[in-house]
Image (cartoon, rainbow, N blue to C red):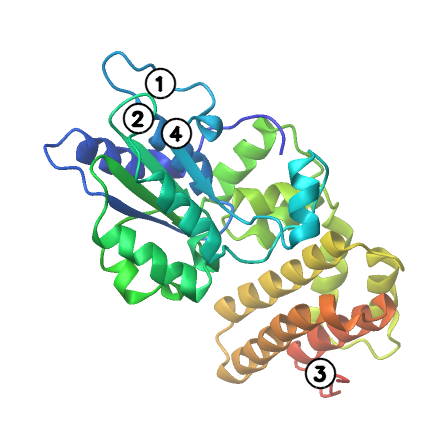
């Protein structure tokens, strides 16, 4: 994802973490909570590296491959994918963290750590634990082996079982400011085109991971067209035609997702800024329909041109125009 950058939103989390780790009784379960793209995974690996380093045990240079740091994330989705993974080939990943992964982790916890007295389990993202996997993890959180610590990376804490949340201490990661995001994009070598940078910052809404993806998509021209659609009606449909041209007839999933995210962010920004209750209601409704359409698009195999028309029409509707969106 480009050059390594510092995370200015980690300062408070590090202070809390190091105060706790320097105390007499370090809590065994932690939730790293905040929206996606705020560096929570980077923090988890660095914090785990500090925790397993003890007297005589150096801090690992590569925490992701340390024998006493277990990282649970999306695994192979089926037997075919597992075989490909075992052979070092590309493979399709599951969309959830499954119970067999938790069971395999628990078997490892029956033995002593390899190098020292501590072991860390990172679950990322814990939001996507299957129900059975979450219940199995809960048992380990209730009776953690000596020297074992759990770091649960979560983008939506409410999706976790209340019993899991109650057994964890929370570290919160706030969204980044536009100035912080811009400085981090510069450090990462992202495009500095002013229009695309501005659109990336707007669409990212405080997430560096999102801002970096959007900066690569050259969203400036798209943002200008969307602004025009949100400013007034498009009776000749020229704006919607231009939107379709800019998205492209064979846009990949990343391009479409960036388009949806930008449209949602722009509508949300207008809703926060408007003083009209009626206008705010129209913007909130448009945002809801954009979210629904974005969820349907990957599975319904929509024609890209029709998708662009629908997105544009929802933006025109939100501007106060009376024409209804198809769908």
Q: Residues within 10 Å of mark 1 (few under 14, many from 20)?
A: some
Q: Are marks 1 and 2 in contact (CB under 8 Å)?
A: yes
Q: Are marks 4 and 2 in contact (CB under 8 Å)?
A: no
Q: Look at 60% across and 29% down and name the residue there.
A: 188
Residue hosting label 3 = 321
Hey, which quadrant is residue 314 in on the image?
A: bottom right
The residue lying toward the viewer, choosing from 27 and 269, is 27
Q: Which mark is residue 44?
A: none
Residue hosting label 4 = 46
Vertical placement of residue 325 versus 24, above or below = below
Distance from the alpha carbon under mark 3 to that under mark 1? 60 Å
Distance from the alpha carbon under mark 3 to that under mark 2? 60 Å
Query: Where residue 26 appears, x then y in whole percent?
Result: 17, 37
Query: Where residue 288 appears, x then y in whole percent?
Result: 58, 76
Which element type, helix, strand or loop, lies under badge 3? loop
Q: Which label's residue is closer to the chain start, 4 or 3?
A: 4
Q: Residues within 10 Å of mark 2 (few under 14, many from 20)?
A: many
Q: Which label's residue is closer to the chain start, 1 or 2?
A: 2
Which element type, helix, strand or loop, lies under badge 1? loop
- Seen as rendered, the residue at the extreme top is 56
Q: Point out the frontmost of discs 4 and 3.
A: 4
Residue hosting label 2 = 52
């Amino acid at each position: 994802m480009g050059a390594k950058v510092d995370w200015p939103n980690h300062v408070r989390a590090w202070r809390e973490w190091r105060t706790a780790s320097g105390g007499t009784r370090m809590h065994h379960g932690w939730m790293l909570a905040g929206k996606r793209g705020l560096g929570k995974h980077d923090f988890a690996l660095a914090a785990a590296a500090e925790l397993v380093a003890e007297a005589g045990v150096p801090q690992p240079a590569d925490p992701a491959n340390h024998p006493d740091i277990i990282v649970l994330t999306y695994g192979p989705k089926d037997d075919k994918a597992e075989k490909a993974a075992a052979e070092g080939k590309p493979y399709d990943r599951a969309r959830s963290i499954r119970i067999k992964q938790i069971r395999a982790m628990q078997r490892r916890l029956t033995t002593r750590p390899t190098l020292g007295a501590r072991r860390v389990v990172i679950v990322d993202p814990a939001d996507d634990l299957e129900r059975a996997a979450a219940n199995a993890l809960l048992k380990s959180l209730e009776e953690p082996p000596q020297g074992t610590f759990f770091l649960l990376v979560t983008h939506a804490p409410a999706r976790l079982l209340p019993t899991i949340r109650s057994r964890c201490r929370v570290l919160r990661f706030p969204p980044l400011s536009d100035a912080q995001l811009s400085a981090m994009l510069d450090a990462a070598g992202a495009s500095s085109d002013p229009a695309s940078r501005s659109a990336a910052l707007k669409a990212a809404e405080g997430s560096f991971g999102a801002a970096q993806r959007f900066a690569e998509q050259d969203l400036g021209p798209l943002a200008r067209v969307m602004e025009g659609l949100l400013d007034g009606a498009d009776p000749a449909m020229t704006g919607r035609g231009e939107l379709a041209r800019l998205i492209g007839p064979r846009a990949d999933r990343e391009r479409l997702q960036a388009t949806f995210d930008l449209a949602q962010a722009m509508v949300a920004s207008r809703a926060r800024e408007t003083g009209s209750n009626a206008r705010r209601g129209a913007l909130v409704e448009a945002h809801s329909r954009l979210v629904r359409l974005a969820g349907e698009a990957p599975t319904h195999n929509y024609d890209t041109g029709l998708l662009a028309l629908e997105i544009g029409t929802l933006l025109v509707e939100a501007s106060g125009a009376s024409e209804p969106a198809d769908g």
